[in-house]
Image: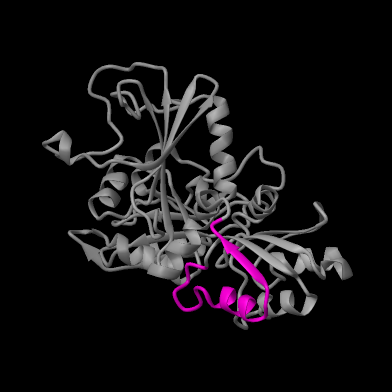
Amino acid sequence: MREALRQARRGIGRTMPNPPVGAVLVRDDKIIGRGFHPRAGEAHAEIFALRAAGYEACGATLYVTLEPCSHQGLTGPCADELIAAGVSRVLIGCQDPNPRVAGRGIDRLRAAGIAVETGILADECRRLLLPFAKLVTTGSPYVMVKSAVTLDGKIATTSGDSRWVSNAKSRRFVHRLRDQCDAIMVGSGTVLHDNPLLNVRGIRGGRDPLRVIVDSRLRTPADALVITQNSTAGVLIATTSVAPADKVRQLKARGAEVAILTACQGRVDLPALLCLLGQRGVMSLLVEGGRTLNSALLAENLIDRLLLFIAPKIIGGDGPGLFAGAGKELMADAIALRHVRTRRFGTDILVDGELTSCLPD
């Protein structure tokens, strides 16, 4: 199953709106076929593994990170192909989280006399499936907020300087993370202050995600680097009805897409924006904004995962923190992260944990 997970990770960020899945066929303690789902419309992981194994698949054991599908989509049902190939045993990481099909593939395999076991390396498989699970159960993407803070909790100095809180190793990991996400989002304040590219750099074979800017008053300059740079990825600017019509035309002329959404207290309705992204099949959304956007997402319980780099630096003073607002009055009311993992990047420490979950623990 670890090899199946390794195969599945090859598809992360490329399968939208399908989940990344890996499969491995084993016979006589030897791997005879491997496969992963490369992108929507192409064969699923199980089919690639069956093709690699050929006639040896008869009597073999399949390890697969997600329950084989049982319905006709852009491709045929994998469960039927496994039955036809004569696979004798199937070990599954997670049941399909899609409530319309959950468990049907397992039932079909068992009805054909195939031995099925579930929950193999379930925690790792579950983590891999979270963005897909969020999309199919809520219609919205899985929201990951990434930031870096100093030891005293600052994301920038009192002058607003934030380059760089984290070190080079941490920043390289972030580019790898961008490459694996369907979209990246910032607020207009970040665009105005930092003029970021929001692209993927230094990653072999990397591709830029959709760039999303939350800009209630449409202050984004038409010559912002995120718009003018040479990239195959699109730019979506979410704004409200107060946006000047001439500015909308100007940005569209530069190739940006402008979506005029409903306003909530004068700001872009974030749930509506996430729904729009979900309708486009966006599963994973990486947020790299400032404390204003972070706080708005937190206030509406829209953050699913937090990735926080802690750098061994002290700024002091009244520089901005990760979130704004009054905050909790009692420590007992603090939001506790779940499934927390830590990792070192040189002298930086990454704390990675979940705030919400669309799958059972």
Q: Position of residue 298 (x, y in %)?
A: 27, 48
Left or right, 202 with respect to 354, comes to right
In this rendered view, identify the residue nearer to me: 47 or 227.
47
Residue positioned most to the bottom = 72
Residue 164 to residue 62: above or below: above
* Residue that appears at 67% across and 80% down: 112
| Left or right of 68, for residue 218 | left
Q: Is residue 314 above or below residue 265?
A: above
Q: In the depicted view, which residue is nearer to us: 337 or 203? A: 337
Residue at the image position 37 percent from the left and 51 percent from the top: 304
Task: Determine if residue 59 is in view.
Answer: yes
Q: Is residue 108 magenta?
A: yes
Q: Can you give x and y, in whole percent of width and height, for residue 220 in the image?
A: 39, 51
- Which region is colored magenta? 96-119
Residue appearing at x 21%, y 39% in the figure: 334
Using the rendered view, name the quadrant where residue 263 is placed.
bottom left
Q: Residue furthest left?
A: 329
Residue 210 vs residue 347, the one in the foreground: 347
User: In the rendered image, is residue 327 in sight?
Assistant: no
Residue at the image position 75 percent from the left and 70 percent from the top: 87
Q: Is residue 172 above or below residue 300?
A: above
